[in-house]
Amino acid sequence: MSILKIAKMGHPVLRRVADPVSDPTAPEIARLVRDMEETLADAGGVGLAAPQVHVPLRVVIFHVPGARTDDGSQVPLTALINPEIEVLTEETVEGWEGCLSIPGMTGMVPRAKRIRYKGATLSGGVIEREAAGFHARVVQHECDHLDAVLYPSRMTDLSTLGFVEEMRRAAAATDRPESEESSAGPC
Ligand code: NI
């Protein structure tokens, strides 16, 4: 297993559409997913897409900690190969996002409130789930990476884009409680 280097915004691998995986059960895909899991754990994020580790394939991993959902429910670490998203409502919700490829920054991003997603598993099966809230947000963020989309280009108000460190400092200076933006896990 290895911790992989994470590509940052501007790298060409983040600007191309990733290729489908022809065989999700291939040993090199299992190895890639293990390395991505180790890289994500090391970086302390909630999700990671293969292009972020310089591999232009349609593979994402993510998990949803209980603290991030309204009802405390968790989504265990999940690997999806060739994922597809179906948007279930035109309703969107704004929420803070960060990205391991844009380190230290955060911004408010509108996302579809409810989605259905599916993808292949390493064992050749299929995962199909409905998701809402933060769970739906993380999956949309990760799948965007496969189509060369980074969260700032989804933002409708660029004035909310900023450095987490400065936002924390501003919140501390005004005695505001620690704001939600500083706790948004990058992905
Ligand atoms: Ni990201």
Image: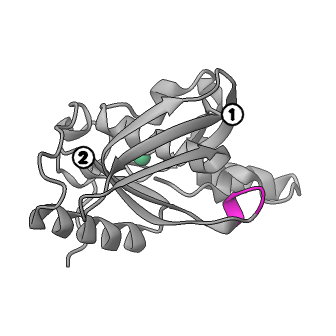
Is residue 105 something that shows in the picture?
A: no
Image quarter where the N terminus lies is bottom left
Report the number of discs: 2
- The region drawn magenta spans 67-71
Label 1: which secondary element? strand
Percent of width and height locating residue 28: 10, 64
Please state if 24 lies on the left or on the right of 119 as rendered.
left
Please state if 187 lies on the left or on the right of 88 as rendered.
left
Determine crowd level at label 2: few under 14, some 14-19, many 20+ residues with C-alpha closer than 10 A. Answer: many
The residue closer to the viewer here, 120 or 167, is 120
Percent of width and height locating residue 154: 51, 26
Q: Which mark is residue 86?
A: none
Please state if 114 lies on the left or on the right of 119 as rendered.
right
145 within the magenta span? no
Image point (18%, 50%), residue name: 54
User: Toward which corner of the image does residue 72 lie, by quadrant?
Assistant: bottom right
Q: Are marks 2 and 1 in contact (CB under 8 Å)?
A: no
The residue closer to the viewer here, 183 or 93, is 93
Q: Is residue 152 above or below residue 69?
A: above
Percent of width and height locating residue 169: 71, 56
- Which residue position holds label 1? 94
Please state if 169 lies on the left or on the right of 141 as rendered.
right
Percent of width and height locating residue 26: 11, 61
Image point (35%, 47%), residue name: 119
How far is the residue under mark 2 from the one under mark 1? 25 Å
- Which residue position holds label 2? 51
Amino acid bearing label 1 = Glu
The residue closer to the viewer here, 166 or 63, is 63
Determine crowd level at label 1: few under 14, some 14-19, many 20+ residues with C-alpha closer than 10 A. Answer: some
Amino acid bearing label 2 = Pro
- Look at the magenta stretch and give its main secondary structure: loop
